[in-house]
Image (cartoon, grey):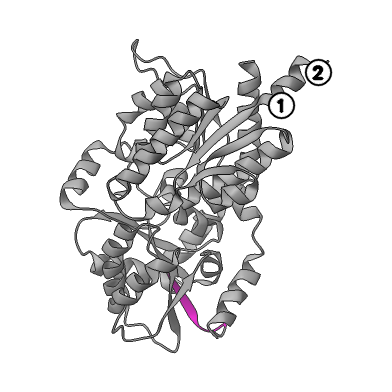
Amino acid sequence: MPSQDSKAHKEMAVFIVAGEDSGDLHAANLIRQLKQLRPEARLEGFGGDRMAQAGCFLHANITHMSSMGVSFLAHVYSFLGLIFKFYRILQRQPPDVLVLIDFPGFNFILARLARFKRVPVVYYICPQIWAWAPWRRRKILRLTQLLLVILPFEETLYRQPLGRQTPPPRKVIYVGHPLGDALAEQPAAEKLAAELRQSFHLGEEVRVIGIFPGSRRHEIEGILPIFRKTVEKLALDPERHRLVVSCCRRDFRPLIERAFQGFPTAVEIVEGSAYPLMAACRLALVASGTATLELAFFQKPMVVLYKVGRLAHRVFRWISTSPFICLVNILGGREIVPESITSRDNSSEQAERVRALLEDTPERRQCLAELSRLKTEIFRPGASLKAAKTLLGFLEGRG
C-alpha cells in the first residue's frame, strides 16, 4: 500500500500563469526545478513557449497579449475566454496551488477565482507596486497565502502591518532574483559579443551603441523617437560608431525601421535574444525594465528612460514610494546609471548623459565600478531552486 507521502507527491498539481516574455523565462526555470524535485507533479498553466519547452502543459499561450499596449483592452474577448477556461479547470480538476508571475491585472482576477474555490495562491515575482501602485499591497496580501519575492526590500514591504482588516500572508520569503539563473546559462560575454560583431561585420575598433526600446508596442512607439533624436545630437562618427537596435519580436521590426527611416548613418536591427547586443555594446539606451538588470550583468553603462503621458507622469511622481524607476538604481540604493521619467522630448538632456558615458571619462569609470559591485551582490544563481523548494515545502505543510 503506498505511503501517504508518496500519494501526496503523485497528486501534486501546480498551475502557473506568466503573461509576459520575462515571466515566461522565469516560470520555465521554476518549472525545471520543480520537475527535478517532484518528477511526478502535474505542471500546467497559461504562459509561453519557454514554459512548454520546460515541461508545462499549456492550456493557452498568452505571452503575445502583453506586447500590444493596454493589453486587457486590446484582447478583452481573449482574456474573458481564458478566465472562463480557468474557472472550468477549477471546477473539473482544481490544482493544489496557483502560482502567479507578475502580470497583475489578469492575475488578480485568477487569484480571486482560486480563492473562491479554496485553491491557495502563491505570488512569485510580485508586481512592482512600490513604484506605481502602493495601495495594491493590501490586495496582494488579501489574495495570497505565500509571497516569493525577488528584491530584498520587498520582504520588508510586505511584512509591514496593514491594520486589523488585512492580516499578512502566512509567509513572505526572499528567494533572490531569478535572472541569476537565466544569465548563468548564457555563453561567455566574449563569445556573445563576437557573435554579434561577426553577423554585422564589425571590427573590434567599432564602438557599438545598443538601443533597447522595450517589449511592448506602445513603449517602442513612445520611446524610439526620443532615442533617435538623442543619437542624432551626438553627431557620431560613422566609421567609429554603429547603432544597433534590439527587436524582441519580429512583428515589431517595421516599427523600428520607420522610427529610423532617413537616419544619417547605418542602423542595424537584431531580432530575438538581446544578449549578444548587450555583450557587444559599449553603452546602451534602454527603456526602464528588466533589460536594465541584464545590462548590469554584462557591465554596460546605460541611460534609462521611461516615457509616459503628462497626467501619468504627475500621478507617478505623487504616488511612487521609490526615488528611482530603474532597478539598477533601486537595488544599488543610489543613482548608478542616469535615469529619467518624462512626458516630453528630453533628448538634449539624454544626449549629454550618453556623451558622458560613451568616452573614457570619470563618470564612465565610476559607473563601471558600481555595476561591478552590484553584479557580485545580485546575480547569484539558485533563486529558482529556492523558490521551488519553498513552494513545495508550503504545499507539503498544507498536507
Question: Which residue is located at x 36 percent, y 42 percent?
Answer: 79
* Residue 238 in picture, x, y percent from top left: 40, 87
Task: For residue 325, say whether it is visible.
Answer: yes
Residue 10, labelled with which disc? 1
Q: Residue at x 48, y 73 (%)?
A: 270
Which region of the structure is painted magenta?
Answer: 204-210
Residue 29, position as x, y percentages in the image: 62, 45
Q: For this rendering, which residue is in front, 382 or 18?
A: 18
Q: Which residue is mark 2?
A: 2
Position of residue 285 relative to residue 22, above or below, is: below
Is 393 positioned to the left or the right of 252 in the image?
right
Q: Is residue 104 left or right of residue 171?
A: left
Quarter location, residue 222: bottom left
> Residue 114, relative to residue 126: is it above or below?
above
Q: Is residue 232 magenta?
A: no
For badge 1, the amino acid type reads Lys
Rendering coords of residue 242 (x, y %): 44, 81
Please report contact status of discs 2 and 1: CB closer than 8 Å, yes or no: yes
Instruction: Give the distance between the C-alpha atoms of the residues marked 2 and 1, in whole angstroms.
Output: 10 Å
The secondary structure type at the circle numbered 2 is loop
**In which quadrant of the rendered image does the C terminus lie?**
top right
Considering every residue shown, the one lying at the far bottom of the view is 239
Secondary structure of the residue carrying numbered label 1: helix
The quadrant of the picture occupied by the N terminus is: top right
